[in-house]
Every structure is written in C-alpha cells, then in structure tokens.
Amino acid sequence: MPHPIFWLAPVASALALIFAYFFYLQMKTKSEGTERMAQIASYVRKGAMAYLRQQYKVVAIVFVCLIVILAFLSFGLKVQNRWVPLAFLTGGFFSGLAGFFGMKTATYASARTANAARNSLDSALKIAFRSGAVMGLTVVGLALLDISLWFLILKYFYPVSDEHNLIIITTTMLTFGMGASTQALFARVGGGIYTKAADVGADLVGKVESNIPEDDPRNPAVIADNVGDNVGDVAGMGADLYESYAGSILATAALGASAFIGQGSLQLNAVVAPMAIAGVGTVLSILGIFFVRTREGATQKDLINALSRGINASSVFIIIFSYFIIKLLQLPLGVWLAMVAGLLAGIAIGKSTEYFTSHSFNPTRKIAHSATTGAATVIISGIGTGMLSTSIPVLAVAAGTVLAYLFASGFSLTNVGQGLYGIGIAAVGMLSTLGITLATDAYGPIADNAGGNAQMSNLEPEVRRRTDALDALGNTTAATGKGFAIGSAALTALALLASYVEELKVGLLRIGQNTIQMLDGTVVETARAGFLDFMNYFRVTLMNPIVLVGMFIGAMMAFVFCGLTMQAVGKAAGKMVDEVRRQFKEIPGVFEGTAEPDYARCVAISTKGAQKAMMVPSLAAIVVPIVTGLLLGVGGVMGLLIGATTTGFVLAVFMANAGGAWDNAKKFIEEGNLGGKGSPAHKAAVVGDTVGDPFKDTSGPSLNILIKLMSMVSIVMAGLTVAFSLIK
C-alpha cells in the first residue's frame, strides 16, 4: 500500500472541485444587470460554445486516429504497454473538460462583473477573481483526480511489491500527459488564432481607421473579439496549464521510481511525494483565494498587491507544509530544498514578468513614450524590451535547475538519478499553488469581457474606468501566468528528458534486449543500467553529429511553429479587416449606430480560420519527434528535445513579455497619458498592441506546450524508436 499521505491528492482533488462548484454557484446568484447586458453576454456565450463544439469535433477525429495508431503499437507491434491508448484518451478528455468548465464560467461571469463594477471595484474584483478561481481549481482538481485514479488502477494490476513494476506504472501514466498535451496544443493554437484574428481586425478598422472606441457595438468584430477572449485565454489556457501541472507530477513520479530503485519503501514514497505536495498546494490555494480583496480607488499597484497577498500566503504555507511531507515520507531533506528552489524560481519569473509588462514600471512606460514618435518606434522598443526580459527568467530557471539538482543529489554530480528527481520536484514546486496562480490568470479575460459589456451596454464612464483598471491588471497577471507556464515547461522538459531515458530501458526490455554493450566493450544488464550507461550506449554526446543535427531541428521547430501560427493569425485577421470594412460600407446604419452589425459573420470567419490553421502546426509537433526517432534514432531525439527546449523557452518568454508590454503601453495611454484615447500616440500604441497580440496570446504561450508535447510523444514512441530506428 502507498504511504497514507498519498490520500492527500484525491482528497484535495475533491475539495478543489467542490469549491470550484461553490464559486460557480456563488457567481450565478449575482445579477447580469440590464437586459442589454444580458443580451450581449448571451451573444458571447453562444459564440464561444459554438466554437468549442466545432473544435472538439476536429480534435476528436485526431484523437481517434492517434488511438488507432497507439493501439496498433501496443497490441500489434507490442512495443508499448497495453494501457497506453486508454491513458492517452483520459488525458485528453480531462484536459478538454477543464477548459470547457472554465470557459462556461467565464462567459457567465463577465456581465455580472460589469454589473458589480457599477457598485464598487472590490465587488467586481471578487466576482472576476473567484470566477477565474473556478478555472484554477477545476484544472488542479481534475488533474489530481486523473493521476490518483490511474495510480490506483495500475497499482492493482502491477503490484508495487516488485520494484520494477513502479517504473512500468509511472512510465505508463506519462502517456496520459501526451493526451493532455495534444488537446492543449489544439486548444491553445486554435483559440489563439481565433482570438487574435478577431482582436486585430476589430482594432485596426475600429480604433485606427474609424476612430471609434474599443468594444464599440458598431464594430462588427466586437462580439468575435469577446468570444476570442474566452476560447483562447480561458479554454486554451486552462488546457495548457492542465498539461503543465499533470506533466510535472507525472515526470517527477517516473524519476522517483527510477532514482530510488533498490531502496525499499523510499521508492514508493518518492513516487507519492509530488502527488502529496500538489495536494497540499491545492488546499492552500483554496485558502489563498479568500485573501484577495481591495478598496475603492485602488491603484494598479494596490490591485497587484491584492492578488499577490493570496499567492504569497499560499507560497509561504506550501514551503512549510511540504517540509513535513518530505519528512514523513523519509526522503532526503535535499528533496525539500529542491522544491523550494523551484518555487522561488517561479516567484522570480513572476516578479520579473510583472516588472517588464506592468505600466506601473519603467519598461512599459518607455514603450508608451516611444509611441509619440510613431508606430515603428513602438514596435522597435517593444521587441527590445521583450528580448531584455528573457534574462531574469532564464537565469532563474538556470539557478533553480542547478540548485535543485545539487540539493537532491547531496551535492554529488555523479548521483544523476536523485539529481534529476530534484529538478522534477522543482517543477512541481513551481506549479504547486497553480490553483490560485491560474485564478489570477483566468480572471483577466473575464475583466476584459466585462469592460466590453460595459462599453456595448453604454454604462456610465465610471464603470468602464473600473473594468479598465481590472483589465490592465489582467494583462499583467496573464503575462505572469504565462511566465509560470513557460518556466515550469523548461523544468518539466528536463525531467521528461530523463523520463525518456527510463522509457528507453522499458522499450529495450520489451523487445528482449536484456544487455547493452558500452563503447569500451563493457556489457551491462539493461534492467540495472543507469542514466549515464544509456547516454554512453546511445552515444548522446555533443561530439556525435546526429545529436547536433537533432538540436538544430529542435531549434528550427520553435521558429517554424511560431511562423505558422503568426501567419495564420495574419491571414485570418486580413479576412476580418475586409469584412468589417465591407459592413461599414455596405450595410446602411451600421457605422452610425442605427443598425445592428452582422456579428455572426465575423464569428464564423474567426472560427473557420482557426479550425483550418491549427492543424498543420499542431500535427507537426506530433509527427516530427516520431520521424526523427525513426530516422536518427535516440541520439537524434535527445538532440531534438534539447534544441526545442532551450530555444523554445527563451523565444516563448520574449514573445509573451513583448506582447504584454505592448498591450499595457496602450492601456497607459488610454488612461489619459501622452494625449489619451484617439491621439496619434494612442494609434501608434494600438499598432504595437496589434503586433503583440499573436506574440502573447497565440505563438508565445503555445511554445511551452510544443516543448512538452514533443517530449511526451518521444516518450510514448520510445519503444518504436529502439525497435525500428535506422540509426541504432
């Protein structure tokens, strides 16, 4: 039996889902306001659900095809565990379910937030934030439920009295991480293309060409824009962070099974530890949510501090409680220090992102000031700021990685297994309080939609001022959330690299290769071989040109992926611009406000553009690791994953922060600075924000899923690679 502390995970899962439902019901008791406010909310809700239904149909077809392939590999070629197809399916299902519940809540919450803003800033913040918490708690609740159930099921069929069975259990569980990553990539890419095509089209024709305010009901693209906030920034982001959270726990559990093999009960305790830490973090996130409140007339810094109170309280308590978890599980103290290193690295990334993207600080204000000399200088300044912003996250992850490795390994570079386990625990630490950090992220689109509802419903200017304050904060928290996701992706990808090596061992044993021969002629039993033995056997060294070629392909994949998604946004946005111009020109009374635009046509353009464009980049993330493995073998795959992780991590931070800074520079001007709304500086800043939209909401955040999906695919296909690769 697992240590009793394991039950923290399923209990915390149940609590998270109960409180998510409680916050949802609490939000539904609030009024949507006037009849016009409810009508606009219904337009957005119907558009969002219609898009999600269409996306799930496409993804379902892809999943059926992949399950058939996985079933053939499992039952036909027998290079995989027979549980793999089902585990893959559940991962995708729960990931999609998390996004669905989060988006449904968001579409009901926006009008209620706008209506609450008619009374006070604090009441609007509470509704928006607690509705965002539904997303956060649903993600962690469903992830822990999926992990706990699979662990109990597989433990029944593979008794843990055999230490090798724990390795089989944990590597099999990694498969549902691939299902979650596949669903997340489609959700993030499709939702990102949808939302930014609508946003760019609405801004370019509305604000720049026609001099009408943001979210003006005369703009035909305004409903599509508000729908996009929900399908991209809520449903897509929820699926994204679901797979980040699940992936970090699963990879760490797999590393624990390998690192502590032969050490009796410590092996099982090492597998249980990340689940227990995640469980405690979930309970603490629920408590932290109740710390978030503010006062009327709060500044941006006051609002940031209000959210920080909840996050900081959860972070402090998780450091304390995780110490007792590690002690009860009798694991080395260094494992706890590794977790703390990961958590602190995450906080450093969050603070760095806040500094570079909030208009309370100099970097974003400098971009705003550059708008006084035109759009070109805004874009140059934003790109420069985004590039500079990569320094602290990269150094934080580097420091967290090295410290976690050293702490967990007892400062022994040769204790590779426990050192890599420490890196996995660091990723778990970074995401341990995801319940509340994701709430601060998901609340942003709700506040944005609330502002749109207030504008389209012609509410008093004070309401829009309050929702704009919450929206500007939402841009910063969204950027911070993306920073957490990207940082954890880097640490998780390193842990997944080690898990890939462990899956290679299982794959070799499955095809009957019970020994491996080193370059010096030494023969080692496959079952007892360590990480360094496999590196030697597969010649994974920088002197091997196959590894270098793989690294180049991995680095290329990050840029090709971004290029495909950016072009998809540009193409769909171009069609949106043409449609908005056409309606202004051809439908009498639309521009004057005496006739209602054809909102549905713009929604259809974004939906069609997203569905078509998301296929190629998403499928490339699945196909490239498989082809690389078959052609270049294990060395090529290892190089591919290293190149994609390093390049993709830095590129993702750059794009997310540049986009966030451009957006808040525009918000800074809209608050009345440098000429205010409608000024030449404002129009220049809108162009910068338009360029930044696909940076921060399509390509950038999708990269962290790309990194992990390629790793997950490589792990699942490891048996195929060792059995059929051209280069052994």
Image (cartoon, grey):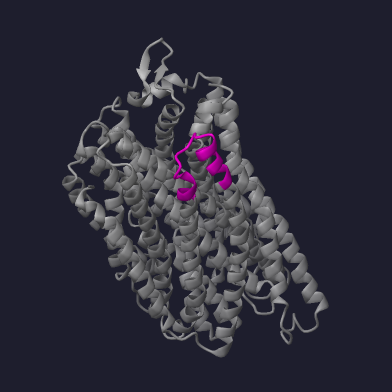
| Lateral position of residue 623 relative to residue 273, left or right | right
Q: Is residue 84 magenta?
A: yes
Q: Residue at x 43, y 22 (%)?
A: 513
Q: Is residue 622 above or below residue 441?
A: above
Q: Which region of the structure is painted magenta?
A: 68-88
Quadrant of the image occupied by residue 369: bottom right
Number of marks in picture: 0
Is residue 692 in view from this perspective? no
Extreme residue toward the top, this view = 521
| Lateral position of residue 628 relative to residue 267, left or right | right
Q: Main secondary structure of the magenta part?
A: helix
Quadrant of the image occupied by residue 81: top left
Is residue 314 in view from this perspective? yes
The front one of 284 and 666 is 284
Residue 523 x/y as whole percent: 37, 14
Residue 259 x/y as whole percent: 30, 33
Q: Is residue 654 above or below residue 718?
A: below
Q: Residue at x 37, y 27 (%)?
A: 531
Residue 399 x/y as whole percent: 35, 39
Q: Is residue 608 above or below residue 379?
A: below
Residue 241 x/y as whole percent: 45, 55
Q: Residue at x 53, y 83 (%)?
A: 461
Q: Is residue 400 magenta?
A: no
Extreme residue toward the right, this view = 586
The front one of 396 and 95 is 95
Quadrant of the image occupied by residue 370: bottom right
